[in-house]
Image (spheres, helix red, strand yellow):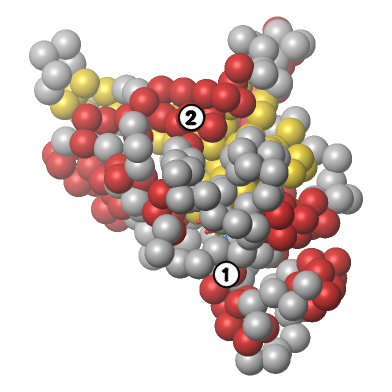
Amino acid sequence: MTEWAPGDGNSARRITASRTMRGESAGLRYGLASWAANLETSRDSQSHLMNIGLFGGTFDPVHRGHMALAQAAREQYKLHRIHFVPANLPPHKQRQPLSPFVHRFAMLALATAQEKAFIPSLLEAPKESGAGTRKDPAEKPNYTIDTVRRLKQSLKGSDKLFLLIGMDAFADIAKWHQSEALFGECEFIVASRPGYSLADVANALPEKLRPRPEVTRPFHKQPAAGDLVLPGATIHLMGDLRQPASATAIRQAVAAGKPLGRFVDAAVAEYIGKMELYK
Ligand code: ATP
């Protein structure tokens, strides 16, 4: 049975896909729920509950798109803290020569300096004292599942962890190490992009969590927005942030001698110039 309750445009839409005991699709239940209101309620009844965000990336360099994602997630999902985790050796970007960890961390520290809730994180810092300026050939890539578990060790059992990610990165999530387990460890907050449908989000899931095609068929006509709650995965979708900045464009702008003001914070632009990065 499919029920549809129209939204008022302000409330987050909550979409729940369920399965029967025999594992067959039982159809979809659509309903309205205000996610932020739910969070408020749970915080009232458990005053110690903290919503924590983990935002990983290469951050080479951190830019206004990253900051817009974090700000929007903090406001919409009432996050008390967001850990920005620069990857030392990201498994998916090993071919591209990355700037040393220490520079990427320094730029993150500058960009987050004015925001108490934004923490530049050393969770994936290189073990060697070289702070990432020298590559250790024996060093293993950082897997997000390990970072998430490490961060959770420092949280209270009542804290709730959210992984922040852009839609382009989420599209490859099924290829991540132990991706299925990752959905069991935390909820996802995904910054959507125009042109993505709810079906794109559902179909990006690791195979075991992916709803069957007959379940996702109606998703093709729906934009990637609202909360998608599936057995084993909860995904909160934020609308387009309208911040098209990318680190690639910034590196190209530096190489072409163009100004960086529209892409990065003034302190980050200053640092890039001083340290002669991306030349
Ligand atoms: P590059 O251009 O080198 O691939 P990037 O700008 O995508 O880098 P990353 O450090 O790889 O930056 O991204 C970290 C996270 O931020 C990813 O989840 C990515 O999807 C997201 N992200 C990057 N740019 C934006 C943007 N403009 N708006 C929203 N999310 C973004």
Q: Which mark is residue 234?
A: none
Q: Work out how far the residue at label 1 is from the one at label 2, CA to CA, in angstroms.
A: 26 Å
Q: Is mark 1 within 8 Å of ligand 1?
A: yes
Q: Residues within 10 Å of mark 2 (few under 14, many from 20)?
A: some
264 lies above or below 182: below
Q: Position of residue 201 (x, y in %)?
A: 35, 47
**Quadrant location, the C terminus:** bottom right
The answer to whether 102 appears left or right of 13 in the picture is right
187 lies above or below 237: above
268 lies above or below 92: below
The amino acid on which the numbered mark 1 sits, given as a three-letter code, is Ser
The quarter of the displayed image where residue 215 is located:
top left
| Quarter, ligand 1 | bottom right
Asked whether residue 24 appears in the rendered view, the answer is: yes
Instruction: State the residue in front, 44 or 231.
Output: 231
The quarter of the displayed image where residue 211 is located:
top left
* Residue pointed to by mark 1: 246
- The residue drawn where x is 67% and y is 12% is 156
The quarter of the displayed image where residue 158 is located:
top right
The amino acid on which the numbered mark 2 sits, given as a three-letter code, is Asp
Q: Position of residue 200 (x, y in %)?
A: 31, 52
Q: Secondary structure at mark 2?
A: helix
Q: How many marks?
A: 2
Asked whether residue 5 appears in the rendered view, the answer is: no
226 lies above or below 265: above
Instruction: State the residue in front, 257 or 5.
Output: 257
Q: Position of residue 152 (x, y in %)?
A: 59, 21
- The residue drawn where x is 61% and y is 64% is 99
Q: Position of residue 143 (x, y in %)?
A: 45, 38
* Residue pointed to by mark 2: 146
